[in-house]
Amino acid sequence: MIRFEQVSKQFPSGTFAVKSLDFEIKKGEFFVLIGPSGSGKTTTLKMINRLIELSNGWVLINEKKISDYDINELRWNIGYVLQQIALFPHMTIAENIAVVPELKNWGKEKIVARVDELLKMVGLDPKEYRNRKPNELSGGQQQRVGVLRALAADPEIILMDEPFSALDPFSREKLQDDMLEIQRKLKKTIVFVTHDIQEALRLGDRICLMKEGKIVQVGTPNEFLMNPANDFVREFVGSKKLTIHLNELMTPVSIGSKLFDTKTISLSTPVGEVFEHLALFEQIAVEDNGKQIGIISRQNALKVISQYLREGGQTHE
């Protein structure tokens, strides 16, 4: 879907923001770029829609170089969400969401239907919010509208540059929940920049950790937690080995019930193996002595681990 081939960005001063990047983002993947300040993650994101032009190499979308696309065509088919919410203050919420569909000459009825559909998707009643102005919304609600504006014209790709970092913890977690639900329904290709490892572990199908303009490790959340590439990754994630027990990840059910037909594991299964299964299944069943006693969902498991790391749990087995 999106492929970087030997991509570098060098500024006139001679400094490299990124150097020799090689990686591919799959169609429908939630791909997270993370790293310390100055690692090149935002530069990498902005090269996808040509807000920053690359110095060497190629970026391809659907096997076509981005330099071969008409710049307007390229950007209209890529949604973009910033940390600075940047809604137009004089326009209503509906008008803000409808900006790109109107530029693409969608019909009025189609635009109204799309706006209402998106507002409902994130729990904002169209009747109540459609005609409000941005200053009548909370910060979290404004950022939700910013996400909807990026989705409005149904683009293939969504770029998100630290979109939730300025929000309070409650609003941030709600927006993360919204993104997981939106992605479950729409399966967009999302490239998401964050400096927060808990956010990356919770949202990402795969994570790309960068340092000084280079890639240190690309992998699933499970691979980062269980098989860090080196000490830098281990320190960045904040964990050597997790002491979380399987029952902390599990939602109990009535003993002997059979809620669904899916992958089944035993109560003694190591946590590392659990995450290998969760890479393939949204949820798995836990059995003890042949009876189902609980379920483990991918979303809940990553939420538990994020909370564990945030609270600074011990890192021995």
Image (cartoon, rainbow, N blue to C red):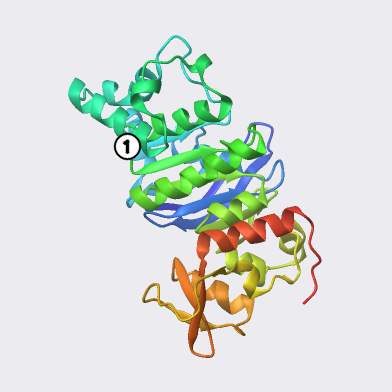
Q: Nearer the viewer, residue 32 or 11?
A: 32
Q: What residue is shown at x 51% (from left), y 39% (from top)?
A: 160
Eyeballing the image, is 304 above or below 91? below
> In screen coordinates, is 115 left or right of 275?
left
Q: Residue furthest bottom?
A: 289
- Identify whether 79 is placed above or below 91: below
Is 231 placed left or right of 49 in the picture? right
SS for callout 1: loop
Q: Quadrant of residue 223?
A: bottom right
Q: Amino acid at mark 1?
A: Tyr
Q: Is residue 235 above or below residue 118?
A: below
Q: From this viewpoint, is residue 158 visible?
A: yes
- Give the image location of residue 112, x and y in percent: 25, 24
Query: In which quarter of the view is residue 126 placed?
Result: top left
| Nearer to us in this view, 262 or 203 | 262
Residue 282, x across and y down, in percent: 44, 65
Q: How many marks?
A: 1
Nearest the viewer among 295 and 181 is 295
- Sort mark 1 into few (<14), some (14-19) or many (20+) by Cα contacts within 10 Å: few
Residue 236 drawn above or below residue 163: below
Q: Is residue 91 left or right of residue 116?
A: right
Quadrant housing the C terminus:
bottom right
Q: Residue at position x 47%, y 52% from top? A: 30
Taking the spot 53% from the left edge, 52% from the top edge, the residue there is 203
Looking at the picture, how far across and down is residue 300, in whole percent?
Answer: 56, 60
Percent x, y of residue 81: 49, 33
Residue 274 lies in what quarter of the image? Answer: bottom right
**Is residue 59 among what the camera can see?**
no
Residue at which label 1 appears: 69
Say which residue appears at 40% left-offset and 20% top-offset: 93
